[in-house]
Amino acid sequence: MSRLIQFDLNAFRSSFPAFADNTAYSEASLVATWNAAIGYISPENYGYLQGESRAKALHLMTAHLVALADIVKAGQMPSMVSASTVDKVAVTLTPPPVKSQWQWWLSLTPYGQQLLALLSASAAGGFYIGGLPEGSGFRRVHGIYP
């Protein structure tokens, strides 16, 4: 039976001092954001990401979501402007220099970038789902190539 990783407010605030202000970042709002974060990263402690690594990933996702909310509150658009004109108002945005929308979204904050690095390091060989266990390797049982 796997155990769930619970939100630890003190550990979160000590890991991310930018969110230490109790007035700006109440416990209730951080818990709500944590609950949103577990929609992206499971709190179940299993797989390649376990223990402190999974807790760190969940904290980074929470910090990423809070930072994105702060960007939106400030009225900023998280994107890269490559050109703009005033007359007839035209703005050109640079397409994200990443492989997927997920990577682009995580690259919008430093916390998301750290999370992407953690997830990439944890899945260096790629995640494997289903089939025979030897199918995740280069050779099958007794050295036979697939």
Image (cartoon, helix red, strand yellow):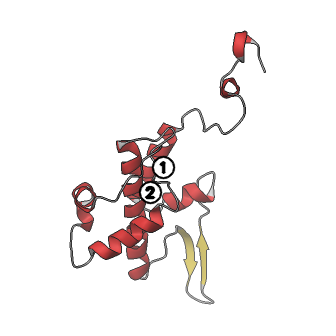
x then y, percent, for residue 83: 56, 72
Quarter occupied by residue 50: top left
Residue that appears at 35% across and 69% down: 31
Q: As drawn, is 134 to the left or to the right of 27? A: right
Label 1 belongs to which residue?
116
Kindly indicate whether the residue at mark 1 contacts the one at mark 2 (C-beta within 8 angstroms).
yes
Inspect the image, locate mark 1, and give the three-letter code of the amino acid beneath it. Answer: Leu
Q: Which residue is the extreme one toward the right?
A: 146
Residue 144, compared with residue 31, is above or below; it is: above
Cα separation, mark 2 vs mark 1, equals 6 Å
Quarter occupied by residue 20: bottom left
x then y, percent, for residue 40: 52, 59
x then y, percent, for residue 78: 49, 70
Return the residue nearer the eye: 85 or 48: 48
**Numbered circle sitting on residue 101:** none
Residue 82, compared with residue 144, is above or below; it is: below
Q: As drawn, is 95 to the left or to the right of 22? A: right
Quarter occupied by residue 65: bottom left
Residue that appears at 44% across and 57% down: 112
Label 2 belongs to which residue?
112
x then y, percent, for residue 79: 52, 69
Return the residue nearer the eye: 23 or 83: 23
How crowded pointer 2 is (Cα within 10 Å; few <14, some 14-19, many 20+) is rated as: many
Residue that appears at 22% across and 60% down: 10
Inspect the image, locate mark 2, and give the three-letter code of the amino acid beneath it. Answer: Gly
Q: Which residue is the extreme one toward the front?
A: 1
Q: How many marks?
A: 2
Q: As drawn, is 32 to the left or to the right of 18? A: right
Return the residue nearer the eye: 141 or 105: 141
